[in-house]
Amino acid sequence: MFEGFESRRVHVRDASVFVRHGGQGPPVLLLHGHPRTSATWHRVAPRLVAQGFTVVCPDLRGYGRSRGPAPTADHRAHSKRAVAGDMLAVMRSLGHSRFLLAGHDRGGAVALRLALDHPDAVSRVALIDCLPISEHLSRITDTFATQWWHWFFFAQPDIPERVINADPDSWYRGDPRSMGRENYDEWREATRTPDVVRAMLEDYRAGLTVDKGHEEADRAAGVRIRCPALVLWSLRDDLEDLYGDPLKIWRHWAPDVRGHGIDSGHHVAEEAPEALAASLGDFFLG
């Protein structure tokens, strides 16, 4: 994976971030989702490099090989604001003060926070298979609660750790053929690491508490994404089935929004890398 890329560990405030980077040209920051690592981009990143971009793929705080502080009672140590601060520091450490940004799933929530909190740093943002967390929570139905029950299970204290760590291979399921063997092996090692599992759960606990509060405060204050935004969603996932056209929701958060669906399941970077890289490249070059 990631032939021609360099890897390093960047120490930022109270976290240590593992990051891969390579290529030459305008910088692009790619943020993975749950429960993946930066390796999920292994089929997309080289395609973007071939299009003329510098590509940076970090593990989010506590995921993969990144490490953060111990969880806090208010979950702020794993808030999207804290993780967005990590990502900004990583990009600055690599010499990129302004960059293009894409986030998938939970990485999309971090991308939203980064674009809202640091608008001068983000020139364009792509939001993939995600909505603002507060938008999900304001639309809870029995269908959402049934299909997305893990959000609320993960928010419980202590019990999820005990359940998942008892048999992580049964809880987190993946296919090495579709994921790619090296990506699968890296992901499997992470999901077997109790500290990683705890951090991933803290991500969700923060989502239902401090992150929700930050988003609601932004909406009340009229804070919106200033840069152009691309919204992409997987047609064989459930985002459109649950909410209809995601663009209608995202237009409450950004004045310049465009987007479309991609024929893929949820892990689009692994399942449809050609289509995803083409959509991202066209948008970033636009």
Image: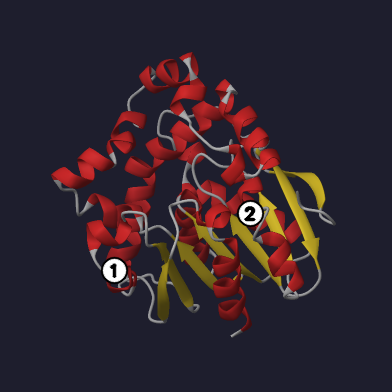
Which amino acid is tagged 1?
A: Ile
Q: What's the amino acid at mark 2?
A: Trp
- Say which element carries label 2: helix
Q: Is residue 167 above or below residue 131?
A: above
Residue linked to disc 2: 41
115 lies above or below 59? below
Proximity of marks 2 and 1: CB atoms separated by less than 8 Å? no
Whether residue 36 is visible, yes or no, is yes
The answer to which quarter of the image holds residue 243 is bottom left
- Near mark 2 (Cα within 10 A), the count class, few <14, some 14-19 or many ≥20, is many
Marks 2 and 1, how far apart at CA = 26 Å
Residue 249's tag is 1
Q: How is the image coloured?
A: secondary structure
Residue 2 lies, in percent from the top left, at 77, 52
- Residue at 47 percent of width and 44 percent of height: 79
Sequence-wise first label, 2 or 1: 2
Where is residue 216, by image quadrant? bottom left
Q: Nearer the viewer, mark 2 or mark 1?
A: 2
Q: Is residue 158 above or below residue 103?
A: above
Secondary structure under badge 1? helix
94 relative to 106, above or below: below
Any part of residue 60 in sight: no
Query: Around disc 1, counting alpha carbons within 10 Å, would you say few (fewer than 14), some (14 to 19), or many (20 or more)?
Result: some
Provide residue 142's location: percent of width, then percent of height: 14, 43
Query: With 17 as the anchor, is 168 left or right in this view?
Result: left
Q: Position of residue 181 (x, y in %)?
A: 68, 39
